[in-house]
Image (tube, rainbow, N blue to C red):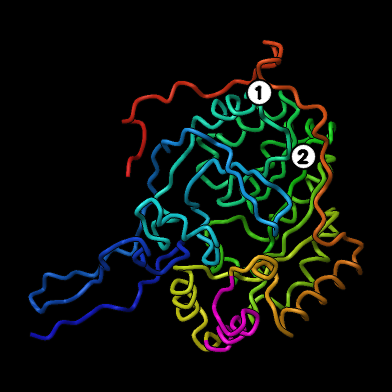
Amino acid sequence: MNLKIHEKPLLRRGRGAASNVTGRFESLRHQDIDDGWSSYTEPDTAVTTQWCDDSNRTIITRNQSPDIHFDRSINPYRGCEHGCIYCFARPSHTYLGHSAGLDFETRLYAKRGAADLLKAELAKRNYRCEPIAIGVNTDAYQPLEKKLQITRTVLQVLLATNHPAYLITKSSLIERDIDLLSSMAEKNLVSVCITITTLDRKLARNLEPRATTPHRRLKTLKRLSDAGIPTRVSVSPVIPALNEEEMDTIVAAAADAGAQAAYAIVLRLPHELQQLFPQWLEQHYPLRAARIMKAIRSVRENKLNNADFGSRMIGSGPRADIIKQRFELACRRCGLSVGRDFELDCSKFTPPDQMPPSQTPPCQKNYGKSGQLSLL
């Protein structure tokens, strides 16, 4: 009997990944086949978002990477509904037994006890205050945040304890928290980075299907800047032969919107992204796919990824050098600092157990019945 293997991924409106590639920790690989007995039916292209509570016991993640300027971070969510196909965090979903593909953007975990966990960690006697980065792995202002407001409760704790924080997002939802952020900015406790990958609306819709549109992000950048909040722009990732040519225009637009600094990271394709990203290219840009993949290899020593410290963020080789020089020149023209984040004040930190009762922020304690959740 001839078996027909269905390899071609389906295009799903509003989703970044084209398939649910099997994670690298799984012992079995799943593949749809037609056995000739009409038992196979084409899968539904509509995929709904589901979420449940995360069972984490800590909220601050530590790192020792020499490539980044912070040593701790908070991610209120696992998975991200924005669905950015290039997201380097996709492979982290495989640790949960899910796929880095559609599962990453449709099966989400929410850390609704984040504020209480943060207070507990900040209250430890051996805690040393340094800026906390929020939303580094997955966006802290993805659509689910509008309902759950986890990020807002985290900011309330940080403001009440005078703890500094770096935020990065590509969502205009951050404007909801301008009241907290401006209060933190008055004490030099916060800076915000807005990611703008492209100004091309069609490319943005394909790259980041459920994220705020690029031009709306520029408005967010301006509103934050006008509120006295230090801002910078992340022109990331720079995808050779795809959005590479837009660096100058993005930097100029961000400068006009009030950004004070900028940085750029060259596309990284760790683990399952080496299958997901080429799939995406074949779907959306089939005539350019081979050239783009060749260009990506040219900045990664003829590989799809290089995880070595010192080069993983910027790439290597002549093309990577040109990207770096062009970006720095664009920043100089617009008067933006390159790669610099703001020096925040750690001296004002007050542990939660020393906070006056009137300053204790409202933290979510009653999680409600499980029936109120959409469980995986």
Q: Nearer the viewer, residue 4 or 357?
A: 357
Residue at image position (55%, 36%) is 59
Residue 320 locus on image (x, y percent): 72, 79
In the picture, residue 128 is in which quadrant?
top right
Q: Residues within 10 Å of mark 2 (few under 14, many from 20)?
A: many
Q: Which residue is mark 2?
A: 190
Of the numbered discs in the image, which one, if any, rests on residue 56? none
Mark toward the viewer: 1 or 2: 1
Q: Amino acid at mark 2?
A: Val
First of labels 1, 2 by sequence position: 1
Q: Is residue 232 above or below residue 153?
A: below
Q: Is residue 112 above or below residue 175?
A: above
- Please say whether residue 202 is visible from this viewpoint: no
Q: Are marks 1 and 2 in contact (CB under 8 Å)?
A: no
- Please say whether residue 50 is visible from this viewpoint: yes
Q: Residues within 10 Å of mark 1 (few under 14, many from 20)?
A: few
Label 1 element class: loop
Residue at image position (47%, 56%) is 92
Q: Would you say 48 lies left or right of 170 here? A: left
The residue stretch that appears in magenta: 290-306
Q: Which residue is mark 1?
A: 125
